[in-house]
Image (cartoon, grey):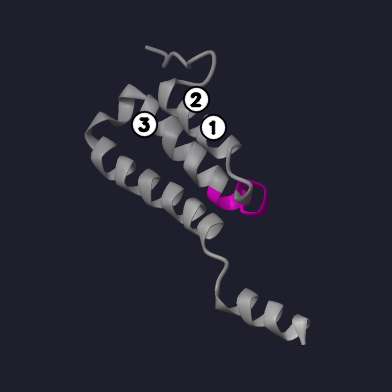
Amino acid sequence: MAEVKPSGPGQVESAVAAELAGLAMAQRRPGLVAVALTLARTLDSPSFGSSHAALSHELRATLDALAAVRRGRGRLTSVTELAVRR
């Protein structure tokens, strides 16, 4: 029997896309965005039911990484800003 493909994004993919839309860092890290959306799309698929726990963990870690990049500026940025002020 042929696998039926969904006609659009599922519930998880839609939620992740909405969350990513609010992150400015999403434009600077397209690879992480692609990973997050792929994981979300996979979570929407019933074919991977046995892997949902691991996929959820990876998705959370990926979203946390994008959010952490947004929150933290990093030491190098701070040092550079201080150097420019002098």
The mark found on residue 46 in the picture is none
Mark 1 / mark 3, whichever is N-terminal: 1
Q: From the viewer's perspective, tell me whether residue 26 is left or right of residue 35.
A: right
Quick one: label 2, few (<14), some, or many (20+) residues within 10 Å?
some
Q: For the residues marked 1 and 3, what is the alpha-carbon distance in whole angstroms?
A: 13 Å
Q: Which residue lies at the image location 72% right of the left edge and 85% below the top edge? A: 83
* Marks 1 and 2 close (CB-CB < 8 Å): yes
As helix, strand or loop, the secondary structure at mark 1 comes to: helix
Percent position (x, y) of residue 60? 37, 46
Read off the residue under disc 3.
43
Quick one: label 3, few (<14), some, or many (20+) residues within 10 Å?
many
Q: Which residue lies at the image location 50% right of the left edge and 46% below the top edge? A: 35
- The amino acid beneath tag 3 is Leu
Read off the residue under disc 2.
14
- The amino acid beneath tag 2 is Ser
As helix, strand or loop, the secondary structure at mark 2 comes to: helix
Q: Nearer the viewer, residue 34 or 47?
A: 34
Read off the residue under disc 1.
17
Q: For the residues marked 1 and 2, what is the alpha-carbon distance in whole angstroms?
A: 5 Å
Reply yes or no: does residue 29 show up in magenta. Answer: yes
Q: Which residues are magenta?
A: 26-32
Q: Which residue lies at the image location 42% right of the left edge and 14% below the top edge? A: 2
Quick one: label 1, few (<14), some, or many (20+) residues within 10 Å?
some
* Marks 2 and 3 close (CB-CB < 8 Å): no
